[in-house]
Image (spheres, grey):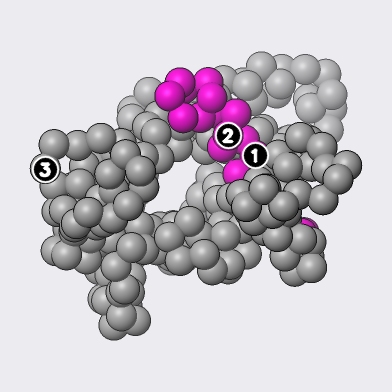
Amino acid sequence: QTSFYGRFRHFLDIIDPRTLFVTESRLKEAVQLLEDYKHGTLPPGVTNKELWGAQKIKQAIIHPDTNETIFMPFRMSGMVCPDQTIVVGLLLPNQTLASTVFWQWLNQSHNACVNYANRNATKPSPTSKFIQGYLGAVISAVSIAVGNALYLYFATEAASLIIMLFSSSASANICNVVLMRHTELEEGIDVLDNNGNVVGSSRIAAKHALLETALTRVVLPMPILVLPPIIMSILEKTSLLRSRPRMILPVQSLVCLAAFGLALPLAISLFPQMSEVST
């Protein structure tokens, strides 16, 4: 967690889609193995590889604050595949206002649920708070995205399109994060001492955590908006795609998937999960 590369490697494990298919029994085995290691009661023959595998499964599926299983579509490992479909939908040509609203609503709804499922959960949050946050996040984010989408109809230069798409996505993502997790700003989050013991609650720590999360959501769209157009401009000149234009959309989908698979761990690796703040 002290280096960017270490965090990047860690989050590659967290977003690994293969963890979505881990069975309940395998999850229990992994958790029990880590408990045995913690208490010094490991059965003979357990290797470091098995321990790291168990750690990967637990961190990808279990919320660190509640120790409860995160609903599959809203895990970090569940972001790549659903978001891939949404990204392709957002990039479809010749969209109507209705289709733009639909894809933006779907995108921001998924983002809202992911933000909530992976929030700091050291303090209980009632369902009413989630509903209020969801409605505020989706309405504001979709309004921003649609407003910018209307402007895009009048933009002709590729650079202008990318800049507007980025500003739209980044600002909508920030609204989503802040509104879905606003209770943390009101009530604060638990702070720990060097031994991991809870010593109090801090709004300053909550503000620090939300600021870092918002910054990751600003960085997240960058590779997705920049890399696919560059790569596709090269691939579309190849004889394979020129002779088979129907393959352009599937290839673009794969390129977007690869870009998102790279962008997600890069963005969430910017900051350590545990930080020191002056309170």
Instruction: Identify the residue at image location x=88%, y=42%.
Output: 45
* Element class at badge 2: helix
Specify the farthest residue to the right. 45
Image: magenta residue range: 1-22
Q: Considering only vertical position in the picture, is 242 above or below 59?
A: above
> Residue beneath label 3, please?
279
Instruction: Identify the residue at image location x=33%, y=30%.
Output: 163
- Tag of residue 13: 1
Mark 1–mark 2 CB contact (< 8 Å)? yes
Judged left or right of residue 219, residue 60 is: right
Q: Nearer the viewer, residue 261 or 272?
A: 272
> Residue beneath label 2, please?
10
Label 1 is placed on what type of residue?
Answer: Asp
Q: Position of residue 112 (x, y in %)?
A: 40, 62
For marks 1 and 3, give the CA distance. 32 Å
Instruction: Identify the residue at image location x=18%, y=57%.
Output: 201
Label 2 is placed on what type of residue?
Answer: His
